[in-house]
Amino acid sequence: MVCADAVGTVPPEWGPGAYDTGFVARALLDEVTAEVAAAGRGAATAVAIDPFDQRSWESAAAEAVSRFGRVDICCSLMGTTGPRAGDGPLLDVDPASWQRCFEVNVTAPLLLSRACARRMIEQGAGGAVVVLSSYAAVMAPVTSGAIGAARAAANMVTSSLAAELAPHNIRVNAVMPLGVQSGDPRFPNPGLLRRSGSAPSWAASDVPMGRPQTADETAAAIEFLCSEEASYISGVCLPVAGGSHTHW
């Protein structure tokens, strides 16, 4: 099941060149859904929801159960950056921009995770939840303090949910990527480019492994945490950051 934070494009009144990575065009959402279905050799469905409304997430979880029979895995892979989503020095960040950063990066993942966790509890067979965090949660990113604070909050949500859901055999973990360069022009990383002008040049100087990470490298960590191979791992916020904890 594929959900989108906000289906559509950045409002035109934001001006030319404005971006917010929490928005996705409906055509792209449908395209990715078809790719997921093809890769999984099975059904996939896309649902447009209100990411800040618990009832909307409950409806999405109910639709997943109706279509697939149950919910065993929940990947809350949501996030946003942008001039109106917390970018900039903390001294200058507008409160509305700060609020959007926290709503998309903390509140929405929590609402989705607990909607699916309730279904898992009803089923009685456990499950796995993975939350998208960021390495910004454990470093002090200059001019990106809002996203760092929001992802640190997402890490605490992960730890707290893991403790709450452990008696139900539901594992909750997070992944903390640093600088993803997908190589797919459909999925740019404007925040990373804003920081350095070039993902490779930034990684060469700031990441011990000397390169940005691929989307597949992040996905592999998520897949592992969802799998039975991680059956005794919960409450972990896993860095996927090229050894950066040895460098910052």
Image (tube, rainbow, N blue to C red):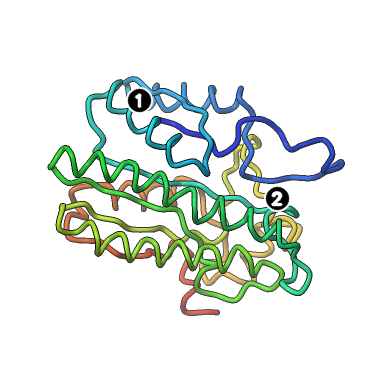
Dividing the picture into quarters, in which one does residue 11 lie? Answer: top right
Nearer to me, 125 or 202:
125
- At numbered mark 1, what does the secondary structure look like: helix, strand or loop? helix
Nearer to me, 126 or 61:
61
Dot 2 amino acid type:
Pro
Identify the residue shown where x is 57% and y is 66%: 210
> Does 153 appear above or below 12?
below
Kindly report which numbered mark, 1 or 2, lies closer to the viewer in this rendering.
1
- The residue under label 2 is 190
Label ID, residue 236: none
10 Å crowding of disc 1: few (<14), some (14-19), many (20+): some
- At numbered mark 2, what does the secondary structure look like: helix, strand or loop? helix
Question: Going from the N terminus, do you reach mark 1 or mark 2 first?
Answer: 1
10 Å crowding of disc 2: few (<14), some (14-19), many (20+): some
Left/right placement of residue 244 relative to residue 20 reads left
Left/right placement of residue 169 relative to residue 190 reads left
Question: Is disc 1 in contact with disc 2, using a CB cutoff of under 8 Å?
Answer: no
Identify the residue shown where x is 53% and y is 22%: 30
Residue 45: x percent and y percent?
41, 23
Residue 122: x percent and y percent?
18, 39
Nearer to me, 184 or 147:
147
Label ID, residue 63: 1
Identify the residue shown where x is 28% and y is 41%: 73
